[in-house]
Amino acid sequence: MNTRAIQANPLAAGLAAGEATTDRIEWIQLSLVFLPLATPISDAKVLTGRQKPLTEIAFLFAEIQTQQGHSGVGFSYSKRAGGPGQFAHAKEIAPNLIGEDPNDIARLWDKLVWAGASVGRGGLSTQAIAAFDIALWDLKAKRAKLPLAKLLGAHRDAVQCYNTSGGFLSSPIDEVLRNVETLLERGIGGIKIKVGQPDPMIDLQRVQAVHKLIDGRAHLMVDANQQWDRTTAQRFGRLVEPLNLTWIEEPLDAYDAEGHAALAAMLDTPIATGEMLTSVAEHHELIRLKSVDFIQPDAPRVGGITQFLKIMALADHARLRLAPHFAMEIHLHLSASYPHEPWVEHFEWLEPMFNERLTIHNGRMHVPNRPGLGFSLSDQARKWTAEKAEFGKRP
C-alpha cells in the first residue's frame, strides 16, 4: 500500500480557517477494483470489429473521511481499458484535497482539474476527478442526513427505469426474449436492445420480435452504439417509425453532433446520445445544435456530480428529456432531481459491489431513504481490489 503522511500543518493545503470552515478532509483511500462479468458481453462495436467482448469493468473508488468523522464514497469506472490510468492520475492529485474543507465541492473540482491540466479537462483526467467529486457529494448528503436526491431538491421519489443488460447482441434472440419476459415480471418500465450489426435487416427482425412480445406492456428503445453511417441511420429510422420506439440511441458517431441534429429533424422517433462524451462543453454542443431529444450524460465520465448538474441546467433550459448512462446507483438521485420526467438505466452488474439494493416497482426505480447515495462497499468489492493508495491520517 502506498501511504503518504498528512502535512505537518493540516491547513497548509487548504484555505485559511474562517468561521464558515468547520471541518477538513483528513484521510482518503483510493481503490482499483475489477468487477468480472459472468459472460462476455458484445454490442455493435464488437460485431463491427472495433472492440473485443467486455469481460470486466474497472472501478476507481474514492473513500473520504474528515476530522469531524464524516465520510463519503464515490466511484468512476472504465470498460476494456483505462482503469489503471484513472487510478494512477487519482493518486497524483489526491494530496491536493488533504486539509481542505469538504463543503467546497465546486472549488475543489477546479483545484483538481488544474492540478492535472496538462493532460486536459476531459477524458481520463476528469473521470479520475469524478470519484472524488461524487464522494464529496455523498459525504455532504450523509452529513445532512438526507438522500442525495433530497439534498439536491427532488422532483419525484421514483424514476422510470429501463433495462439494457438483457438485450445485448451476444445473446441469441430466444435468450433476449426470455430476458425481456423476466424483466417485465420484475416491474421494469422499459426495454432497450442493441442494434448496429453489419446487416441492419437482422437488427430489424430482432426489434420486431421484442416489440411483438412486449405488446404495449413497456417502452422499447434501441441502441446502435455509434456503428451506423448517416444513410444507414436514416433508412433504419424510417423502417422502425411504425413501432413507436421511445428512442434510437447513438445511431451515429458520438462526436457527430451535426449528423445527429439532421437525424433528429428528419425522424419522428426521438434521438438519444451523449454517454461517451466527457465534458460539459461537448454536451453543450449537442444541445446547441438540437442534436438530441434525450440527453444521456454519465456522471463518472463527465467529471462527477458537479459537472453533471451543469449539464442538467443546460438540458432543462432546452426542455430536453434526461436519460443518464449506466451507474444507476448515482444517476437515480440525479434523475429524481431533474424537472422533466426522466429515465434511469437499470444494470444489475454493479450489485455485487454494494451491500444495499435498489427497489423497482410498477416500472419505476425508487429513491432509497438512506442518507447520501445510500450505498456501502461490500466485502466482495474489497476482495476484487487490485491496488490501494492511502493519503493523510485516518481519523
Image: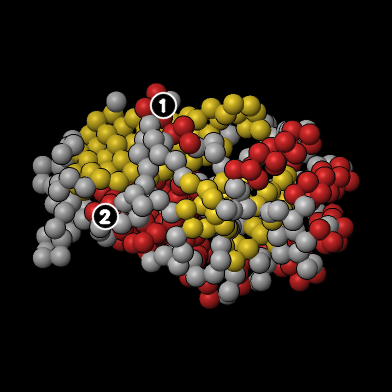
State which quadrant residue 181 falls in. Answer: top right
> In the rendering, at what x and y percent does residue 204 appear?
85, 48
Q: Is residue 283 visible?
A: no
Residue lying at 77% horizontally and 52% vertically, measured from the top left: 215
State which quadrant residue 320 falls in. Answer: bottom right
State which quadrant residue 186 falls in. Answer: top right
- Per the model, the C-alpha gap separating discs 2 and 1 is 27 Å
Q: Residues within 10 Å of mark 1 (few under 14, many from 20)?
A: few
Look at label 2 and name its amino acid. Answer: Lys
Residue lying at 71% horizontally and 53% vertically, measured from the top left: 217
In depth, the one of 151 and 92 nearer the eye is 151
In depth, the one of 346 and 195 nearer the eye is 346
Badge 2 or badge 1: first in the primary sequence: 2
Q: Across the whole image, how many numbered discs are drawn on residues?
A: 2
The C terminus lies in quadrant: top left
| Residue 369: assigned label | none
> In the rendering, at what x and y percent does residue 184 appear?
65, 45
> In the rendering, at what x and y percent does residue 175 appear?
74, 33
Quickly name the residue at label 1.
Answer: 380
Q: Is residue 289 left or right of residue 377?
A: right
Quickly name the residue at label 2.
Answer: 145
Q: Is residue 209 above or below residue 1?
A: below
Look at label 1 and name its amino acid. Answer: Gln
